[in-house]
Amino acid sequence: MRKHRMTDLGGGDPLAALVPAHRVDGGGVARIEPGERSHPEGRHVHDDPEAFLILAGHGTVEIDGAPTGISAGDVLVVEPGEDHHLVASLEEALTTVWLHLRPAG
């Protein structure tokens, strides 16, 4: 997992510098309620990278079971095969944009 700030994205294609040779293939906006965990059913992995833009709130991202603090303004790039879950803090909801990425071309 790589963690960035939205200010690292620069102009143009905002993810090109972080995930070269990939394009956005789909995505959406998710709200995780206070104290909740995304994908509670268990292991959650993809064959391609997935990016998260943290819009509001704070909490943790669990990558292969290891927690890392996250907050509004962070940009996460989850690498292929990494088991990942977002956990909202107990105090406030966590709002994110998630983007599935595919190799360009």
Image: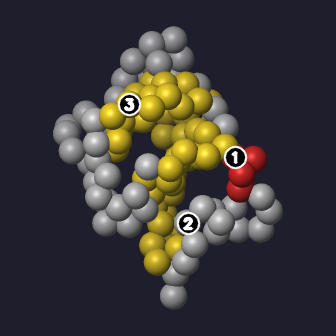
- The circle drawn on residue 19 is 2
Name the residue at 46% across, 78% down.
103
Q: Where is residue 27 drawn, in percent x and y?
A: 49, 57
Q: Is residue 40 left or right of residue 85?
A: left
Q: Where is residue 26 drawn, in percent x and y?
A: 48, 63
- The circle drawn on residue 67 is 3
For the residue marked with disc 1, what is the amino acid? Met
Q: Earlier in the sequence, mark 2 or mark 3?
A: 2
**Disc 3 crowd, CA 10 A, few/some/many (<14, 14-19, 20+):** some
Name the residue at 55% across, 66% down.
19
The answer to whether residue 4 is visible is yes
- The circle drawn on residue 6 is 1
Q: Check disc 1 and report its element: helix, strand or loop.
A: helix
**Disc 2 crowd, CA 10 A, few/some/many (<14, 14-19, 20+):** some
Distance from the alpha carbon under mark 3 to that under mark 1: 20 Å
Near-viewer residue (72 or 92)? 72
Q: Earlier in the sequence, mark 2 or mark 1?
A: 1
For the residue marked with disc 2, what is the amino acid? Val
